[in-house]
Image (tube, rainbow, N blue to C red):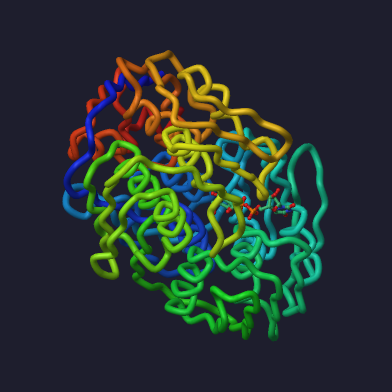
Amino acid sequence: MDKFVIRGGNPLVGTIRVSGAKNSALPCMAAAILTEDEVTLENIPQVRDIETERRLLASMGAEVELREGKQQDQTTICCRTLSDPVARYEIVKTMRASSLVLGPLIARTGAARVAMPGGCAIGGRPIDLHIKGLEKMGAVITQEHGYLEARAERLRGAHLVFDKITVTGTEDLLMAAVLAEGDTLMENCALEPEVADLAALLNAMGARIEGAGTATIRVHGVSSLHGARYRINPDRIEAGTFLIAGAITGGDLIVSNCNAAHLGAAIAKLQEAGARIDVLGPDAVRVRAVAQLSAADISTEEYPGFPTDMQAQYMALATQAEGVSLVRENIFENRFMHVQELVRMGANIKVDGSTATVRGPTRLDSAAVMCSDLRASASLVLAALVAEGETIIDRVYHMDRGYERFEEKLIGVGAQIQRLGNVFAPRDPAEVAG
Ligand code: UD1
């Protein structure tokens, strides 16, 4: 298993480039199921979750091609034949977002067999709202031996009101609705930019969707979709992570190829904590730490609120801010697993239910720590960048799930990071088979 060895203390200076959004790429790849034609996606990040989705689609009979060389960030998917519309547990267990194939599979083939995702490190993460919506559209869904079996002659448009805001739930039902007979009205939808990204692709494929990115989405069902070429939006969580990297190290960093319009909550909070932020244009943001950072509370919310996917990284920053920062996690239970590792590095953090109280600034020092999930890994890297001495971070495979060439990018702006072990190679056949 790969490890990072990080020597802290260097301010990060220079320009760092953001990759395409993993959380847009995953539903967009699943959307290819909805057509017999080719769907080509650009700005696809080369991360392990994308590789898992590629394996998932290929295991169902799809042709999936990842380009080499200059077009490395492009993938073409052709689901002309879906000989085996089954999402097997072996694949689903490693990536909960696999449940995104449920809606498109039923819509396209009238049948789906998808393994239940099971618990994941950051809480139960059920998919009951996906199931409820599909049933309302006429699917018959049963559960057997850990698999959901779904059938429907043709889905019917319906009035769907989400009991709770869910990002992949909104995406899954949107993909089901585009090929349903009649109109679907979806209310209390997720506002995340990734939903709008997916809807833009679907519309380019011939779907008729209005209102994606707002709480109310209207879909006029069509009988078939065609192929399309689409460019995925930049990853707002990766961009936010880099903004924190610039601020925490007292650096001067330009985060390029991002979408500044999607970074509002992160930018506002960093400014409140005393970082200087200049939006240089629609796709570039500069961050500088001009003075001692000061405490600022965060409370995770659905978009456009502060993202739960940046809570762990923000907590690393809070350890370096003067005063008491309250970090409230409102989206997932059990999303504080980075806390004990930060404490091992010297942070002063107490957790009570869904609130963590961070007292700073504290001197962080080198320790051996372990990643527990994707964003927790980023938090540990950020902490290590300001820790004294050499921090060893184990289980960086969690990081490889969602950050493209993370250490290479940070090294490019002055970080001292060494990867020990087998360097992550997403297209290595052995890796794919494993
Ligand atoms: C997506 C993101 C993830 C992010 C999360 C919240 C992807 C691939 N992943 O995850 O990075 O952290 O949004 O911004 O886009 N819930 C239910 N029933 C359901 C579905 C969800 O109760 O059927 C609950 C969840 O347990 C959670 C909340 O709703 O408490 C939000 O979850 P959801 O928005 O669905 O998260 P994901 O889409 O899995």
Residue 381 at what x, y percent from top left? 38, 30
Query: How many discs mark residues in the rendered view?
Result: 0
Residue 318 at what x, y percent from top left? 47, 38
**Is residue 248 shown left or right of residue 165?**
left
Residue pictured at 50% horizontal, 77% vertical: 225
Residue pictured at 54% horizontal, 25% vertical: 348
Residue pictured at 36% horizontal, 69% vertical: 230
**Is residue 360 shown left or right of residue 39?**
right
* 236 and 137: which is toward the camera: 236
Visible residue check, residue 157: yes
Visible residue check, residue 63: no
Residue pictured at 49% horizontal, 68% vertical: 198
Could you say which quadrant of the image residue 1 lies in?
top left
* 427 and 2: which is toward the camera: 2
Residue 152 at what x, y percent from top left? 75, 67
**Is residue 64 shown left or right of residue 287?**
right
Is residue 58 placed above or below 93 in the rendered structure?
below
Residue 334 at what x, y percent from top left? 67, 35
* 216 and 63: which is toward the camera: 216
Is residue 1 placed above or below 308 in the rendered structure?
above
Could you say which quadrant of the image residue 372 lies in?
top right
